[in-house]
């Protein structure tokens, strides 16, 4: 037995991979060149470089990985570098649409020109407000307007005088009364009285009436022609006013046409301003009483430029991180003014979103936020599909009754979207959303670990040095950095790996530097790093301490000394999110005659997960293959985790449960100073498990509190040796012979360590040596099988002879 223990005992140097300070080629991290490149993510770096450089449609990027691996930092760095070499995208402006006011026009200008156009238009509006009223107040306008009016009066006077002469020649006097002009007959230049007119012969009266009617008809023709002259004069005055306004506005607009006319849509827009001024002169021209009307003042607002996207100060392509990607923040909106209960809007109230600001560059979004905000995911896919970004308020497309609103012209979209999320979200989107596969063809997979090579150790040192320099912290000496590197391997759960969860590493850097500062130490040493780790654990270990306290008081019963049949110490891991620890648990098994097989009490009480159930079924397969080749397996067994009420999952205790059943069948006690972890397959091979470091430390802490005897220890799978990164206290106890770690590879090795009795190797007949564990188990199962046969349905007791070929005396 001692030989087996010595063989399976893990050497103390294999319990933790130390980083010797002399492996580091510097005295302090201040001597190390600052880190420039991203470390430990070669696969992710190559994928990201491909995705960023790929210009074909659909090659947007999904960055997958857990938090704390430096995804955001790397994304920011690589996008900034890539964007710096790309051209600056154009500015975008929304202009008033004179032909269709509900559909503002989008125009693009070179970066910086949009702001210039906006300023120039503001200056133009100011100039127009002054120049146009001033032009109408000038003497030239008044002189021309007076001349036109005089021409009209002269024409009217000439026509009236002509009728007056004809009337005089015909013996009529033309007079003007309240109702207009009328004709009165005369004789010898004098007006005829009524009596004189009545005394005239009938023929003369009829002739006068005929001549009067003719004159009246000519008068009406003159009046009609006068009205036409008035209309023509009014048109001449309107033309004059238009000419005056255009003379005032034309040169001002012409300057802008010369400067911006080469840009698509701007020339038409500027010409539209002149046409609009001419069309709305009545609102623009000043009145004698109050000057320009309010309508005229407001008319100039439509000439303002909405600088929608301003890239004037952008260097390279834009990189936009939208941390709150709700609908309006991402896709923009149309704002409204409220006046007297009435909503109004115009093209200057169209506001951009992140997708517009990032157009021509990169947009970085958190996948979870995009998926949880209503309408965002579908709208984003629609924009990527159609390659245009449309500004419309949320729900516009779903309204049952159409409402009057703006419909801004869509802007062409050329953008690279980077979604950042978890592996789970990626799997769900890939499986359930067929559009996701079309639009996000590049997956960037961030790992949580990297090989522990001299090169990566040097990168770790450079990383720590960069943090200390950037945050003005005390630098690390070689012992401090060596301890931090060992902590990186502990986080990775592997002696040959280093963790890339840099957030957790940085936390220890900050805290260790704080402890060093508190001691007024010039550098951060190993003691400061150890103190930071210990304090970090202490802040989160309240639950662990409470559970251990209950074990020490036997409220939760776990033995750490003595021997018991059918009872063993198993190990599980409790994960609290920010902290995980190993919890010892008592596992018991009772075996008896029956045909129910192995019954997992946790499963029957619905407290067992699928992985744990699989582990129990697997060990049943092992029992059948080992002990039921020549006889049926007639067995009833009950196995359970005592005082475990939160449920059990995982198969890491399947070997432990198997040892417990074998102990119960063989009637051999198991040493309670040993705890076991490891899964088993149907061939009896011990398989690796997770959380081995936490499990070992959890049982060690319980044994330490009760007192180390030198007989205590933990059995682990041999494959898990490289996963051990035990703390200094455990390794010290092992070095002093107070605690032991055994690495087993088969059930036979494990059961011998636990019971002190050899497992037994079958001979050519399949019989086990007498006194071995498997001999005793086989005898017990033989007895169960015979008992089931003898005490079957008939209830009678048949012959009592042993039917096994391995029974003594045969």
Image (cartoon, rainbow, N blue to C red):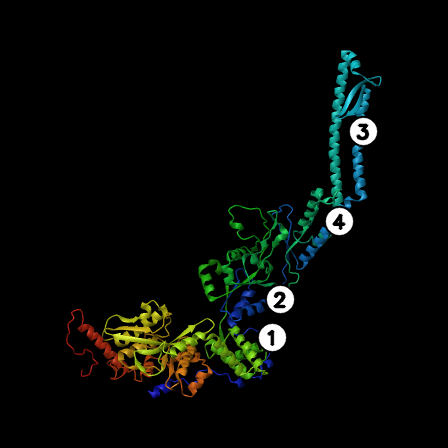
What residue did someone put label 1 on?
470
- Distance (Cα) linking label 3 and label 2: 80 Å
The total number of labels drawn is 4
Q: Are marks 4 and 3 in contact (CB under 8 Å)?
A: no
What residue did someone put label 4 on?
130
Q: Residue at x 59, y 82 (%)?
A: 520
Number of other residues with Cα within 10 Å of mark 4, as a class: few under 14, some 14 to 19, many 20 or more: few
Q: Earlier in the sequence, mark 4 or mark 2?
A: 2
Q: Earlier in the sequence, mark 3 or mark 1?
A: 3
Q: Secondary structure at mark 4?
A: helix
Q: Nearer the viewer, residue 559 or 580?
A: 559
Residue 676 left/right relative to 161: left
Where is 394 relative to 733, above or below?
Answer: above
The x and y percentages for residue 191 are 82, 18
* Quadrant into which the C terminus falls: bottom left
- Distance (Cα) linking label 3 and label 1: 96 Å
Q: Are marks 4 and 2 in contact (CB under 8 Å)?
A: no
Q: Earlier in the sequence, mark 4 or mark 1?
A: 4
Q: Residue at x 47, y 76 (%)?
A: 492
Q: Nearer the viewer, residue 259 or 608?
A: 608
What residue did someone put label 2 on?
84
The x and y percentages for residue 648 are 37, 71
Q: Are marks 3 and 1 in contact (CB under 8 Å)?
A: no
Residue 87 left/right relative to 44: right
Q: Earlier in the sequence, mark 4 or mark 3?
A: 4
What residue did someone put label 3 on?
158
Q: Earlier in the sequence, mark 1 or mark 2?
A: 2
Q: Secondary structure at mark 3?
A: helix
Which circle, 1 or 2, is nearer the viewer? 1
Give residue 135's quadrant in the image.
Answer: top right
Q: Nearer the viewer, residue 347 or 81?
A: 347
């Amino acid at each position: 037995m001692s030989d087996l223990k010595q063989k399976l005992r893990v050497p103390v140097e294999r319990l933790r991979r130390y980083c010797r300070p002399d492996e580091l080629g510097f005295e302090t991290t201040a001597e190390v060149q600052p880190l420039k490149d991203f470390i430990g993510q070669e696969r992710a770096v190559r994928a990201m470089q491909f995705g960023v450089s790929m210009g074909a449609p659909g090659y947007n990027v999904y960055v997958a990985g857990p938090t704390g691996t430096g995804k955001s930092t790397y994304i920011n760095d690589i996008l900034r570098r890539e964007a710096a070499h790309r051209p600056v995208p154009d500015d975008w402006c929304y202009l008033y649409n004179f032909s269709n006011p509900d559909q503002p026009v989008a125009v693009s200008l070179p970066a910086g020109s949009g702001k210039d156009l906006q300023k120039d238009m503001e200056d133009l509006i100011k100039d127009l407000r002054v120049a146009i009223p001033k032009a109408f107040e000038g003497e030239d306008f008044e002189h021309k307007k007076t001349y036109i009016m005089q021409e009209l009066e002269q024409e009217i006077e000439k026509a009236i005088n002509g009728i007056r002469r004809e009337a005089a020649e015909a013996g009529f006097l033309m007079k003007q009364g309240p109702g207009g002009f009328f004709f009165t007959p005369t004789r010898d230049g004098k007006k005829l009285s009524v009596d004189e007119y009545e005394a005239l012969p009938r023929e003369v009266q009829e002739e006068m009436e005929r001549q009067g009617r003719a004159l009246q008809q000519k008068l009406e023709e003159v009046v009609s022609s006068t009205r036409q002259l008035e209309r023509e004069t009014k048109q001449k005055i309107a033309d004059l006013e238009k000419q005056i306004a255009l003379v005032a506005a034309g040169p001002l607009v012409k300057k802008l046409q010369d400067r911006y006319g080469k840009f698509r849509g701007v020339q038409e827009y500027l010409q539209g301003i002149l046409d609009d001024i001419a069309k709305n002169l009545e609102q623009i021209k000043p009145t004698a009483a109050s000057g320009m009307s309010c309508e005229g003042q407001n008319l100039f607002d439509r000439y303002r430029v909405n600088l929608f996207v301003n890239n004037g100060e952008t260097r390279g392509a834009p990189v936009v991180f939208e941390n709150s990607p709700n609908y309006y923040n991402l896709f923009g909106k149309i704002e409204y003014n409220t006046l007297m209960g009435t909503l109004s809007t115009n093209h200057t109230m169209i506001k951009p979103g992140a997708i517009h600001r990032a157009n021509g560059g990169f947009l970085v979004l958190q996948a979870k936020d995009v998926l949880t905000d209503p309408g965002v995911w579908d709208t984003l896919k629609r924009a990527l599909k159609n390659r245009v970004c449309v500004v419309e308020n949320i729900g516009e497309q779903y309204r049952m009754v159409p409402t009057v609103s703006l419909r801004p012209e869509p802007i062409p979209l050329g953008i690279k979207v980077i979604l950042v999320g978890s592996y789970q979200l990626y799997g769900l989107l890939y499986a359930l959303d067929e559009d996701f596969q079309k639009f996000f063809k590049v997956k960037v997979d961030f790992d949580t670990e990297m090989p522990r090579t001299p090169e990566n150790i040097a990168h770790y040192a450079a990383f720590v040095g960069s943090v200390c320099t950037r945050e003005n912290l005390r630098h690390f000496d070689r012992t401090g950095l060596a301890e931090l590197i060992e902590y990186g391997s502990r986080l990775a759960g592997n002696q040959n790996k280093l963790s890339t969860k840099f957030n957790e590493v940085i936390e220890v850097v900050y805290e260790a530097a704080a402890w060093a500062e508190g001691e007024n130490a010039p550098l951060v040493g190993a003691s400061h790093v150890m103190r930071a780790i210990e304090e970090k654990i202490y802040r989160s270990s309240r639950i662990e301490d409470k559970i251990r306290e209950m074990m020490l008081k036997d409220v939760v019963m776990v033995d750490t000394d003595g021997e018991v049949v059918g009872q063993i110490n198993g190990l599980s891991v409790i994960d609290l999110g920010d902290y995980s620890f190993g919890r010892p648990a008592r596992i018991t098994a009772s075996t008896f005659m029956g045909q129910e097989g192995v019954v997992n009490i946790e499963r029957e009480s619905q407290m067992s997960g699928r992985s744990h159930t699989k582990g129990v079924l697997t060990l049943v397969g092992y029992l059948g293959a080992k002990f039921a080749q020549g006889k049926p397996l007639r067995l009833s067994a009950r196995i359970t985790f005592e005082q475990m009420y939160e449920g059990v999952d995982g198969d890491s205790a399947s070997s432990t449960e198997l040892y417990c059943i074998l102990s119960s069948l063989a009637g051999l006690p198991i040493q309670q100073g040993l705890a076991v972890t490891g899964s088993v397959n149907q061939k009896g091979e011990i398989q690796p498990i997770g959380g081995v470091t936490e499990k070992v430390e959890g049982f060690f802490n319980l044994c330490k509190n009760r007192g180390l005897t030198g007989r205590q220890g933990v059995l682990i799978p041999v494959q898990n040796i490289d996963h051990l990164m035990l703390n200094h206290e455990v390794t010290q106890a092992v070095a002093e012979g107070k605690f032991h770690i055994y690495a087993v590879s088969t059930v036979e090795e494990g059961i011998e360590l636990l019971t002190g009795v050899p497992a037994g190797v079958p001979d050519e007949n399949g019989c086990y040596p007498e006194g071995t564990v498997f001999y005793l188990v086989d005898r017990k199962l033989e007895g169960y099988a015979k008992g089931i046969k003898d005490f079957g349905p008939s209830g009678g007791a048949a012959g009592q002879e042993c039917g096994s070929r391995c029974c003594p005396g045969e």
